[in-house]
Image: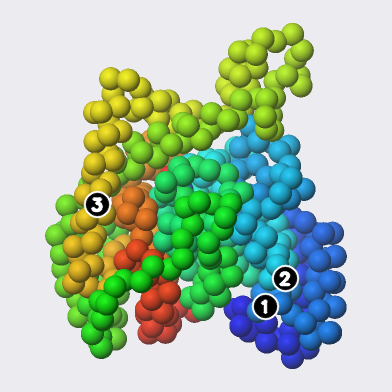
């Protein structure tokens, strides 16, 4: 997609202005059905596109994405423009700086046409937790697009933006990408700066692209990756020692994982992908990995602990919504208490309470400390598998896109969506969601590939091979 559009611009078949206007028109035409955007920037985007037109004329395009209309999840700060994380408590918050990813995209000439919807503060797996409205799945409007980057995945799938930038703390790039039939790439922890991204759980949060294909994911990753002095956790690519891979690598699968798959379409995709890899000449080897069932409880302890700490800054004084603006005669405690009570949605409150509980004295050792110990074992568990193979294949989630409202009354059912994805974040590994086919019910299926830490580039090259063989070309009819 990026290559094609970039070539069209270079050959004079289109211009950044025309392209941007076309995408904005599409948004007007169909996004009232999808609701994938919280805000668009028509005037600003068109003005920026005119600047890009000038660069084209001068032969001074800054990159392949120069002049392409893109979007970003509304959890990423864009200077001078409202950034809400889809939460009421951040309504009216206007950042005075750009996130590092935004700066890098702007420096490459990308035109940000709008901000995509999400589950408030990225808490969720369906985008139904947005405090403003739910996003629909472009393949079937009665289904969820996944979450929390559901607005991003729906927009890219329906071609309302060339690509979108999402975040993934426990699956939020990969699961919505899989529900919407697009590619979702979660880089290794630390390969992309988190500066200017509203924090969910800081030891797990990763920023990455949602794109139409692997070539685009690679292009965008190359632009946004890198060490940033504003995020001390960023790293350069690490080398994996001398470990020389054989001519054709081994791909690992996890024993017993099939039993956790909930529907036929997901099973077909998973088993079909094994056959595709075999045809590509890979050897498939199964491994024991005892942490699948432990991943979820460990994630929901550590993540909520970090969420409760990160959300403490929204106190009705420093950012966004404040009760103080509505009522004058308040004590400081009234402002804190009532602003948070009114401003936070149900899910944020649930996580704050869970997080405070697992961190409270008397429970800290039983929950937080134990979860940290298991996290280390999970990292070791992956290391052992990766001693023998290059990549791991798993499903992305237990089932394909589910119906709106189906899981909203049962948080645990919703959390179970994350079974195959959260465990990857706990180890900080790179992983990608790859479309496989369209199920009988007309919804996309997908699989996940995981690579050793920092092997992001290798994972993308491998996924490209798979993509060629699978040749997924279907688009939603909307
Ligand atoms: N669905 C998971 C959760 O609710 C993951 C969210 C995410 O990756 N931001 O925590």
Q: Is residue 470 visible?
A: no
Contact, mark 3 vs mark 2 (Cβ under 8 Å): no
The image shows residue 381, relative to residue 163, as above or below, that is: above
Relative side of 225 to 56, left or right: left
Percent x, y of residue 264: 28, 63
Q: Quadrant of the N terminus?
A: bottom right
- Left or right of residue 461, residue 267 in this image: left
Residue 169 at x, y percent in the picture: 44, 49
Q: Is residue 37 above or below residue 467?
A: above
Q: Residues within 10 Å of mark 2 (few under 14, many from 20)?
A: many
Looking at the image, tell me whether mark 1 or mark 2 is earlier in sequence order.
1
> In percent of the image, x 50 and y 42: which residue is there?
200
Q: CA distance from mark 3 to mark 1?
A: 39 Å
Determine the image quadrant of residue 306. top left
Q: Which residue is mark 3?
A: 378
Q: Is residue 352 visible?
A: yes
Q: Secondary structure at mark 2?
A: loop
Front residue of 419/340: it is 340
Q: Residues within 10 Å of mark 1 (few under 14, many from 20)?
A: some
Given residues 355 and 148, the one toward you in this image is 355
Residue at mark 2: 109
Q: Which residue is mark 1?
A: 63
Identify the residue shown where x is 15% and y is 64%.
Answer: 287
Q: Is residue 439 above or below residue 261?
A: below
> How is the protein colored in the picture?
rainbow
Q: Earlier in the sequence, mark 3 or mark 1?
A: 1
Does label 3 or label 2 sit earlier along the sequence? 2
Circle 3: element type: helix
The quadrant holding residue 444 is bottom left
Where residue 373 appears, x then y in whole percent?
24, 41
The reply to whether callout 1 and callout 2 are in contact (CB within 8 Å) is yes
């Amino acid at each position: 997609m990026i290559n094609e559009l970039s070539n069209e611009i270079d050959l004079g078949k289109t211009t950044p202005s025309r392209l941007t206007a076309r995408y904005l028109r599409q948004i007007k035409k169909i996004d009232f059905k999808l609701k994938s955007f919280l805000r668009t920037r028509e005037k600003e985007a068109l003005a920026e596109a005119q600047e890009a037109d000038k660069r084209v004329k001068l032969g001074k395009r800054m990159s392949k994405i120069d002049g392409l209309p893109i979007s970003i999840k509304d959890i990423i700060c864009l200077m001078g423009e409202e950034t809400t994380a889809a939460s009421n408590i951040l309504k009216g918050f206007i950042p005075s700086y750009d996130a590092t990813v935004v700066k890098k995209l702007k420096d490459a000439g990308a035109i940000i046409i709008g901000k995509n919807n999400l589950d408030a503060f990225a808490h969720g797996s369906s985008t139904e937790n947005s405090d403003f409205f739910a996003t629909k799945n472009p393949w079937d409007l009665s289904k969820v697009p996944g979450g929390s980057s559901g607005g991003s995945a729906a927009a890219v799938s329906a071609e309302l933006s060339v690509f979108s930038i999402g975040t993934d703390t426990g699956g939020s790039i990969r699961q919505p990408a899989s529900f919407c039939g697009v590619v979702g790439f979660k880089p290794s922890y630390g390969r992309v700066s988190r500066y200017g991204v509203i924090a969910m759980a800081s030891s797990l949060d990763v920023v990455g692209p949602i794109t139409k294909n692997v070539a685009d994911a690679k292009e965008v990753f190359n632009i946004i990756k890198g060490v940033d002095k504003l995020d001390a956790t960023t790293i350069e690519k690490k080398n994996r020692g001398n470990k020389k891979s054989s001519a054709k690598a081994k791909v690992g699968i996890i024993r017993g994982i099939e039993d956790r798959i909930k529907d036929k379409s997901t099973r077909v995709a998973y088993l079909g992908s094994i056959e595709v890899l075999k045809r590509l000449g890979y050897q498939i080897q199964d491994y024991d990995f005892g942490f699948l069932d432990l991943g979820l409880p460990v994630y929901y302890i550590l993540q909520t602990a970090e969420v409760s700490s990160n959300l403490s800054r929204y106190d009705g004084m420093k950012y966004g919504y404040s009760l103080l603006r509505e009522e004058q005669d308040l004590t400081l405690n009234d402002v804190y208490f009532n602003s948070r009570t009114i401003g936070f949605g149900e899910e944020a409150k649930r996580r704050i309470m869970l997080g405070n509980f697992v961190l409270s004295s008397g429970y800290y050792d039983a929950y937080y400390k134990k979860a940290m110990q298991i996290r280390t074992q999970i990292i070791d568990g992956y290391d052992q598998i990766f001693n023998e193979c290059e990549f791991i294949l798993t499903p992305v989630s237990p089932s394909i896109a589910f119906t709106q409202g189906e899981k909203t009354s049962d948080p645990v059912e919703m959390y179970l969506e994350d079974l195959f994805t959260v465990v990857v974040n706990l180890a900080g590994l790179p992983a990608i969601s790859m479309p496989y086919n369209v199920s009988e019910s007309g919804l996309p299926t997908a699989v996940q590939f995981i690579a050793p830490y920092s092997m992001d580039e290798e994972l993308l090259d491998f996924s490209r091979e798979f993509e060629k063989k699978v040749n997924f070309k279907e688009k939603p009819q909307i």
